[in-house]
Image (spheres, helix red, strand yellow):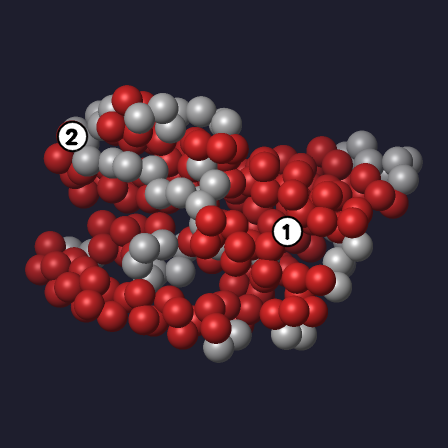
Amino acid sequence: MGLTERLFDRSPQEWAFLGLALLIAIPIHEFAHAIAARWAGDHTAEDMGRVTLDPLKHLDPVGTFLILLGGFGWGKPVPVNPANFRSPRWGSVLVSAAGPASNILLALALGVIGFRLGLLQHVGFTYQSLAVQLIGLNLGLAFFNLIPVPPLDGSHVLVGLLPGEQAIRVAKVLEQGGLLLLILIVFTGLTGVLIGPPVRLLLGLFTGLW
């Protein structure tokens, strides 16, 4: 399906569902980054008003467009100063992983409460579709951001987990070619190859629908 079909082959109801899902998934993701940074010792995000669930504080035009287009993307990056972390290395890993982790936990909670416990069993198909879309979007947002390519969260997690000299080498390589690699991943269809399997697996496990 081409770009035009992806953008215009949705019903008004589907657009409404996607919009609502965005207003939940992205603020949760960025709020988790900000609150983790504060916990790790850095108050930069807090001082800039980012410890909030207000969507207007967190939506990024390019990242939001990509989510509308393909179900993956990012929010406005949360500003952090690693020098303020009590442990610069592990603080960076914690803050970077917090965003994707929050989306996976939200997807798990929605799946278990809505489907595994049967809360949505007797509601209309409309509300079940909304729940599935919200769960899928959260999983897509989480796993896309875990791809270890700058400026995505996964690159910071990877560098933080590597030993000192190896981390420096990998960071330099990612810094030099990361943006180009991300563009190639997005526009060659590799995104679906990379994140499709874990998203489908967890969507099935969380909801029991397949």
Report the number of numbered marks.
2
Instruction: Please name the amino acid that badge 1 sits on.
Output: Gly
Q: State the image coordinates of residue 155 (x, y, percent, origin top left).
A: 30, 56
Query: Which image quadrant: the N terminus?
Result: bottom right
Q: State the image coordinates of residue 23 (x, y, percent, origin top left).
A: 59, 37
Q: Is residue 180 visible in the rendered structure shown here?
A: yes
What label does residue 136 carry, if any?
1
Residue at position x 65%, y 43% from top? 19
Residue at position x 15%, y 64% from top? 172
Instruction: Please name the amino acid that badge 2 sits on.
Output: Asn
Q: Secondary structure at mark 2?
A: helix
Q: Are marks 2 and 1 in contact (CB under 8 Å)?
A: no
Residue at position x 56%, y 50% from top? 139
Q: Nearer the viewer, residue 162 or 16?
A: 16
| Mark 2 neighbour density, 10 Å: few (under 14) some (14–19) many (20 or more) | some
Q: Could you tell which of marks 2 and 1 lies nearer the N-terminus?
A: 2
For residue 122, above or below residue 179: above
Q: State the image coordinates of residue 67 (x, y, percent, origin top left).
A: 55, 54
Q: Give residue 125's quadrant in the image.
A: top right
Q: State the image coordinates of residue 59 (x, y, percent, origin top left).
A: 47, 41
For residue 174, above or below residue 64: below
Q: Give residue 32's quadrant in the image.
A: top left
Residue that sits furthest to the left in the current view: 165
Name the residue tied to disc 2. 84
Q: Give residue 115's quadrant in the image.
A: top right
